[in-house]
Image (cartoon, rainbow, N blue to C red):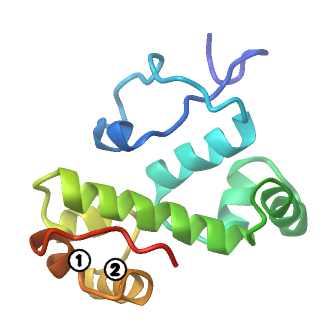
Amino acid sequence: MTASSPGFVYPKITPASLYINRREPEAGLPSSGNSFMDLLAKLLMVYGRRSPEFHARKMGLVKHSDFNAAIRAMTGLRACDWIDEYIHIAACDLLRNTDRSITLIARQLGFSSIATFSQFFRRIQRQSPYAYRHNGATYHFP
């Protein structure tokens, strides 16, 4: 069954699956039951942190407002806020559970530089990625 086949459900992106090479099949991962959000989570892991407009186009939506309305209806958050929260959770998980360099994590999550990633992370987490990894960090809910 392919992504274009009727009845295909995109796999749920779980913390454990964040480390899977993007080219590996993900057929064994369970679905969250919401294929729209599963697709968005998958797009975030493939393309990283991009604008809501970018992800709306990738999902085949013509209007950004439709995308934002769908995300708000399902989560109560604006699309850009949900994307930032998802990327933040992924960053925390990667920093805590892998030995990948912070530069590699930043690149994987779609940041153009480690400085941009550090500013993003510090804004939400209130500490640097390095401090989070090395100080027995706890996740900060914004």
Image quarter in which the N terminus is found: top right
Q: Amino acid at mark 1?
A: Pro
Residue 134 as seen in the image, left or right of residue 72: left
Relative height, residue 62 to residue 12 (above, below): below
Number of marks in picture: 2
From the top left corner, tell me how far across and down residue 75 is, in percent: 74, 58
Relative height, residue 74 to residue 22 (above, below): below
Residue farthest top in this picture: 1
Which comes before the other along the chain, label 2 or label 1? Answer: 2
Element marked by disc 2? helix
Q: Amino acid at mark 2?
A: Phe
Question: What residue is shown at x 74% (from left), y 41% (from top)?
Answer: 36
Residue 107 as seen in the image, left or right of residue 60: left
Question: What residue is shown at x 16% (from left), y 51% (from top)?
Answer: 98
Distance of label 2 from label 1 (alpha carbons)? 9 Å
Question: What residue is shown at x 21% (from left), y 63% (from top)?
Answer: 104
Residue that mark 2 sits on: 117
Which corner quadrant of the image does residue 131 belong to?
bottom left
Q: Please state which of residues 12 and 27 is positioned toward the viewer in this rendering.
A: 12
Q: Please state which of residues 124 and 6 is positioned toward the viewer in this rendering.
A: 124
Query: Mark 2 or mark 1: which is in front?
Result: 1
The answer to whether the residues at label 2 and label 1 have Cβ atoms under 8 Å apart is: yes
Q: Within 10 angstroms of label 2, few (less than 14), some, or many (20 or more) residues?
A: many
Residue that mark 1 sits on: 129
